[in-house]
């Protein structure tokens, strides 16, 4: 879309800041206020993506890029994106996240998969939309490399110790994809225990991928005290949305 047609389009369908919902100028992804205010994850470990390193829990993910901590207006925006049909936020987050990801010679970009039942329930896969917007920004090729072959318990309803086993055998490589030696960028919305990304990366690596880098909008802060942490998990549960 040209700059002029984008401006005309925005008169009729204005874009909104995902964090405060105010109308933003055409071509902007978020407002100047929120750009200053929202807490970014710049000091997280680059390999596991957490403020307090959890690298010993990760065997297959090579690196994690993220934007924000999963709290306050970030949490609200992601819940709206996933639950309230604000699919347009995928574009804003996709563009902001694309800026955060360096060019690492990726062959393909993909996302964590949803089961057919989950897809029917939500109507669309937010992770896939995010990945496709990032692909467009970075001129990468999106491929649905993974599929979810069985239903699982919602990760946020389980204690941390059960989250890994809950996913055993849940993901598989999509048929007819050859990923031997490929460098893959894997997209999800939130990193909580890391079990979903780690299991996805395991399947990709065992299928022959040379490297799997992940990118997410937000990570939960593991510096919080256990009480505060369980509050966040409960809150997610009330909204019955997947976070992991
Ligand atoms: Zn804003
Ligand atoms: Zn680490």
Image (spheres, grey):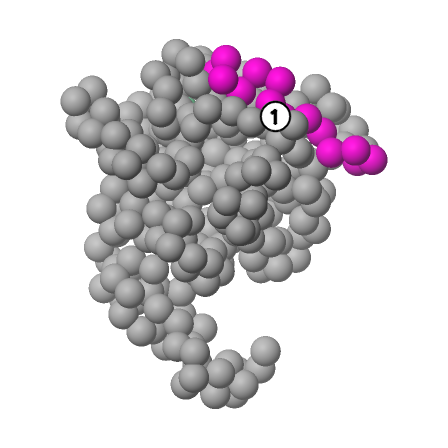
- Can residue 188 be seen at all in this image of the molecule? yes
Relative horizontal placement of residue 11, taking residue 150 as reference (left or right): left
Q: Residue at x 79, y 33 (%)?
A: 175
Q: Residue at x 33, y 44 (%)?
A: 68
Residue 36 sits in quarter:
bottom left
Relative horizontal placement of residue 11, taking residue 130 as reference (left or right): left
Range of residues picked out in magenta? 164-177
Residue 187 sits in quarter:
top right
Residue 168 lies in magenta, yes or no? Answer: yes
Q: Residue at x 53, y 39 (%)?
A: 118
Instruction: Tell me: residue 80, above or below residue 148.
Output: below
Disc 1 designates what residue?
150
Q: Nearer the viewer, residue 243 or 33?
A: 243
- Can residue 215 be seen at all in this image of the molecule? no
Mark 1, secondary structure of its residue: loop
Relative horizontal placement of residue 64, taking residue 16 as reference (left or right): right
Image coordinates of residue 50 in percent, x first then y, are 36, 28
Image coordinates of residue 96 in percent, x first then y, are 44, 56
Instruction: Tell me: residue 233, above or below residue 161.
Output: below
């Amino acid at each position: 879309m040209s700059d002029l047609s984008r401006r005309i389009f925005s008169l009729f369908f204005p874009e909104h800041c995902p964090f405060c919902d105010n109308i933003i100028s055409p071509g902007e992804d978020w407002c100047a206020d929120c750009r200053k205010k929202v807490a970014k994850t710049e000091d997280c470990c680059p390999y596991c993506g957490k403020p307090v390193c959890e690298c010993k829990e990760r065997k297959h993910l090579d690196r994690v890029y993220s934007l924000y901590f999963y709290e306050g207006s970030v949490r609200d925006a992601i819940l709206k994106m996933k639950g309230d049909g604000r699919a347009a936020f995928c574009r804003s987050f996709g563009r902001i996240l694309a800026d955060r990801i360096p060019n690492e010679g990726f062959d393909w970009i993909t996302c964590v998969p949803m089961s057919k039942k989950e897809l029917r329930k939500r109507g669309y896969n937010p992770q896939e939309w995010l990945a496709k917007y990032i692909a467009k920004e970075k001129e990468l090729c999106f491929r649905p490399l993974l599929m979810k072959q069985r239903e699982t318990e919602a990760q946020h309803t389980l204690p941390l110790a059960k989250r890994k086993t809950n996913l055993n055998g849940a993901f598989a490589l999509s048929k007819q994809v050859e990923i031997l030696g490929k460098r893959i960028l894997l997209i999800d919305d939130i990193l909580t225990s890391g079990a979903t990304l780690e299991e996805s990366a395991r399947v990709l690596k065992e299928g022959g991928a040379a490297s799997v880098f992940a990118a997410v909008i937000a990570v939960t802060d593991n510096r919080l005290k256990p009480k505060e942490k369980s509050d966040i998990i409960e809150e997610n549960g009330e909204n019955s949305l997947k976070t992991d």
